Image (tube, helix red, strand yellow):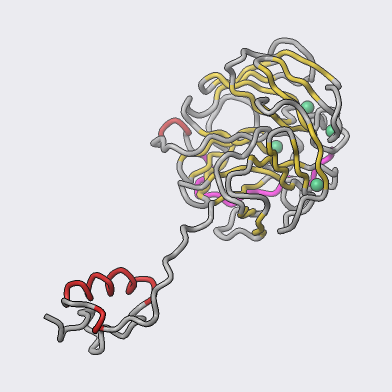
Amino acid sequence: MHRTPLRLITATAAVAAVACVTLQASPATAQGGDVGGRGSTFYLNDSYTGTANQVFTYGDTDDVVYFGDWDGDGIETPLIRRGVTFYVRNSNSSGAAQSTFIYGNPGDVVVTGDWDGNGTDTLAVRRGALYYVKNSMTSGPADVVMGYGNPDDTVLVGDWDGNGTDTLAVRRGNAYLVRDVISTGVADYTFAYGDPGDTVLVGDWDGNGTDTLTVRRGNRYFLRNSTTSGVADAVLDYGNPTDTAFSGDWNGDGRDTLGVRRPPAPARPVPPADVDCANFPTQQQAQWWFDAYYPMWGDIAGLDADHDLRACEALP
Ligand SMILES: [Ca+2]
Ligand SMILES: [Ca+2]
Ligand SMILES: [Ca+2]
Ligand SMILES: [Ca+2]
């Protein structure tokens, strides 16, 4: 697929050496696999500003979620997996699944990509070093079975050569072994990027049609626009260090940007409304109650008439 022209990404530094930044733990994720994390709310950003411009809910907090272009309109949207059933949604908006289908076995590892270059992303099931590639979102046998890498390799999916088809790369530490065809064989080339412990994302950051890597450390992202060894082309901060981040083209402009998945906020206790100082035998007990609710709800029970943050001062 031909992509839109390059647009420069605003970055906090033009170039930075990747290896000199302190590593921070963050959830593992990679384009092609499920996004990981928890939460049914998805915050998508079409640029690298501080606020998501598309926010919606889909599925349940603990669902396994993938993002891809299931209908070929250029926009990547969510897909939920529950066992062998996949629930497709083709817009980044809150709502129900638009179609469902069955594929693979419950224990299979699933990756997604546009294996045949027709513009739609579909599934491949991984069993060890074998990939059962399917070119349609339907039940039935695989279209291609291929072997690549070792059973314990981390696998990434991307269009590394920009020819419109997604293929595999396996990661070993900070080395990436890239293959540009969907067939059994050895790597076409290898490059190194970042540190072995880095979280990595795959995407077309500059919109030139080729997918490349970004490594993530905390809420800092080190973008590189070629699958070659070297330092970051751009560095930027986004979201919170605890976010589960993933990448995709949320608006069909040919450029991949970030999204985060967050679990719902913990339920807040509902403060009782009919409490007053007569409910407490001592000032200290009234104070405990007051201190529990005051930070979020204020003096809802009117225990601090003189507003000095001491509750029920007339109590013993
Ligand atoms: Ca789509
Ligand atoms: Ca396809
Ligand atoms: Ca390709
Ligand atoms: Ca690119």
State the residue in front, 149 or 206: 149
Q: Image quadrant for the N terminus?
A: top right
In the rendered image, the residue lying farthest to the bottom is 306
Q: Residue at x 29, y 83 (%)?
A: 276
Quadrant of res 38: top right
Ligand 2 image-quadrant field: top right
Q: Is residue 11 magenta?
A: yes
> Magenta-highlighted stretch: main secondary structure?
loop
Percent coordinates x, y for residue 206 in the rendering: 69, 42
State the residue in front, 49 or 299: 299
Residue 146 appears in view: yes
Q: Is residue 19 above or below residue 75?
A: above
In the rendered image, the residue lying farthest to the top is 185
Is residue 87 shown left or right of residue 175? right
Residue 5 appears in view: no
Percent coordinates x, y for residue 205 in the rendering: 66, 42
Q: Residue at x 53, y 42 (%)?
A: 221
Is residue 26 shown left or right of residue 100? left
Q: How many marks?
A: 0
Percent coordinates x, y for residue 97 in the rendering: 77, 50
Percent coordinates x, y for residue 89 in the rendering: 77, 49
Q: Image quadrant for the C terminus?
A: bottom left
Q: Residue at x 53, y 32 (%)?
A: 231
Quadrant of res 140: top right
In the rendered image, the residue lying farthest to the right is 118
| Magenta stretch bounds | 1-15
Q: Residue at x 65, y 27 (%)?
A: 156
State the residue in front, 116 or 300: 300
Q: Is residue 268 magenta?
A: no
In the rendered image, the residue lying farthest to the left is 316
Q: Is residue 92 above or below residue 84?
A: below
